[in-house]
Image (spheres, rainbow, N blue to C red):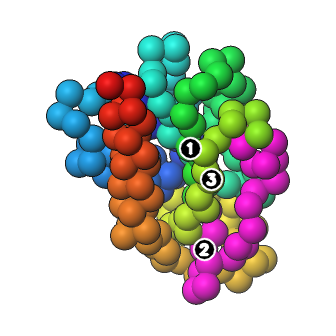
Amino acid sequence: MRILVSAASKHESTAEVATRIAGALRAGLPRDAVVDVIPAGDVGETTSYDAVVLGSAIYLGRWLEDARKLAERITTRTGRPVWLFSVGPIGEPPKPDEDPAGVGDLIRATSARGHRLFAGRLDRHRLGFGEKAVVLALRVADGDFRDFDAIDVWGTQIAAELSRAEIGKL
């Protein structure tokens, strides 16, 4: 079994979430399972993967272009399980707490088995001028709001579902 975990990340926070999901998959899948972690913009072919977990950082309420393009590409193979995740809400409690614009269309297009919205990280030192202006206007505090326990649980749930599907093929 080959699984692709991919994400579009602007400041590495979402890439770290993808890596964490991949770790949970590796821990919960048979030893011969291969879990590749590849940035969305670097993914070549996708046809050799039995499952895909795809995510994106949220900027201006939307997924990044590399992730949207990859989502469009993976719609060409039907029947392959797909899960989607978004990273971006910040604060205590994390805001915004609704799905990003267009993610419903991506869920339908990919026939995703699920979508999770995870809180993100804000470090002003990593931001460009325009991003800093938006953060200042919104009065958002710096911090790492990611819930790695929730991320691990979700990755473990995906691994369990993939393992059950694999057993069903025998």
Majority secondary structure in the magenta region: loop
Q: Is residue 153 left or right of residue 117?
A: left
Q: Secondary structure at mark 1?
A: strand
Q: What amino acid is labelled 2 in the image?
A: Ile
Which badge, 1 or 3, is on the more N-terminal residue?
1
Q: Quadrant of the N terminus?
A: top left
Quarter of the image where one finds residue 35: top left
Q: Which of disc 1 and disc 2 is earlier in sequence?
A: 1
For image coordinates 55% across by 68% down, the residue present is 119
Q: Which residues are magenta?
A: 88-107
Residue 95, by quadrant, is: bottom right
* Residue 62, visible in the rendered structure: yes
Q: What residue is disc 1 on?
A: 83
User: Disc 3 on helix, strand or loop?
Assistant: strand
| Badge 1 vs badge 3, beta-carbon distance below 8 Å | yes
Give the x, y percent position of residue 110.
Answer: 69, 33
Instruction: Answer above or below: position of 68 versus 87.
Output: above
Q: List the residue tagged with mark 3.
A: 115
First of labels 3, 2 by sequence position? 2
